[in-house]
Image (cartoon, rainbow, N blue to C red):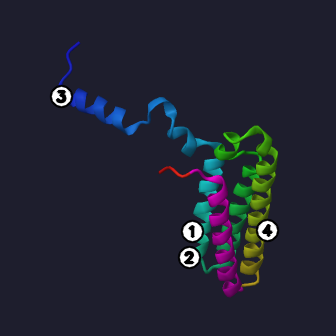
Amino acid sequence: MKFNMLTYALVASLCLSQPLFGAEGDKKDSPLAKQMDEMNDAYKAIKKETDPVKGAALARTAQDALIKSLAEVPELVAKGPEGEKPKMVASFRTMIGKAFVTFSEIEEAFIAKDLEKVKTLLEQAREQKKTAHDKFVEDDA
């Protein structure tokens, strides 16, 4: 079988673009990562939204993603010490629950057409996200 330069270039680019043995790819494709991406997309859209109906729908999208994420365990927790896992899982679920409440309040604020309250609650959601990521997301560096 003869290979030309185009074939070599294609194979090389494919090899360089894919992580070996699925190491990094699995993280972004995990069910938890997918739910967090969905929630984050809704969060970003809410920040720009002024229409109460659309804003409330986006808040419900975030809530749905958060509910689905409750069944998952962050990779950092799964790799952690056995004796700490129950405590860490409970802490993760508590943070998800608090975020769910915040997005429920955002939905209520949109329904009430209180965009100032939406802004305040979005800041709260941002802080919750930062706290959760500090605790449950492993640094890639």
- What amino acid type is highlighted by mark number 2? Lys
Identity of the residue drawn at 78% across and 55% down:
91
The answer to which image quadrant residue 98 occupies is bottom right
The answer to which image quadrant residue 126 occupies is bottom right
Residue assigned mark 2: 48
- Label 4: few (<14), some or many (≥20) within 10 Å? some
The magenta segment: 114-138
Task: Give the secondary structure at mark 3.
Answer: helix
Residue assigned mark 3: 5
- Label 2: few (<14), some or many (≥20) within 10 Å? few
The x and y percentages for residue 11 are 30, 29
Circles 1 and 2 in contact, beta carbons < 8 Å:
yes
Rendered view: 133 above or below 52: above
What numbered label is drawn on residue 101?
4
Circles 4 and 3 in contact, beta carbons < 8 Å:
no
Identity of the residue drawn at 34% across and 36% down:
16
